[in-house]
Amino acid sequence: MSVAADRDGRDPDATHIVAVNDGRVLGTCRLVFRGTTAQLGRLAVEPGRRGAGVAGAILREATRVARTRGSARIALHAQTYARALYRRDGYSETGEPFEEEGIEHVAMEKALA
């Protein structure tokens, strides 16, 4: 993703979730709230910590925060290689793969009922 694409102006109003261990940032994501939908984005985990459960912990915290804020669902655009991560957390695909910033993605969502 280009730096220009990353500057979408939503960060100031977003809720940012940061996983920290011993003062070191291991991963992060953000939630942008629109009506009853929380849009999850910018999930990133330090390369050396991938596969260690950091992303799952971030997703669980994002779910907790979205529920607390009254969201009915969380929606996201997942890079297709990461679909299994989101499926394990209860997300389902809602469309066909598409290209975003030159990378194949798929829309996914999870109901918070």
Image (cartoon, rainbow, N blue to C red):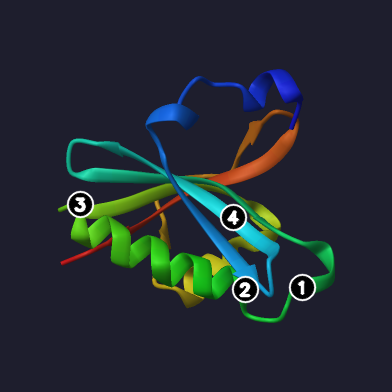
Counting residues from the N terminus, which is met first, the one under dot 2 or under dot 3? 2
| Percent of width and height locating residue 85 | 58, 70
Q: Amino acid at mark 3?
A: Ser
Q: Earlier in the sequence, mark 4 or mark 3?
A: 4
Residue type, label 4: Thr
Write down the residue under mark 1.
49
Within 10 Å of disc 4 (Cα), the crowding (few <14, some 14-19, many 20+) is: many
Residue underneath mark 4: 28
Q: Is residue 64 visible?
A: yes
Distance of label 1 from label 2 (alpha carbons): 7 Å
Quarter of the C terminus within the rendering: bottom left
Taking depth in this image into account, of 21 and 96 the one nearest to the observer is 21
Task: Establish if 26 lies above or below 76.
Answer: below
Could you tell me the amino acid type at mark 2? Answer: Val
Name the residue tied to disc 2. 54
Q: Residues within 10 Å of mark 1 (few under 14, many from 20)?
A: few
Q: Looking at the image, do the residues carrying marks 4 and 2 touch, with CB atoms under 8 Å apart?
A: no
Does label 4 or label 2 sit earlier along the sequence? Answer: 4
For mark 3, what is the residue? 71
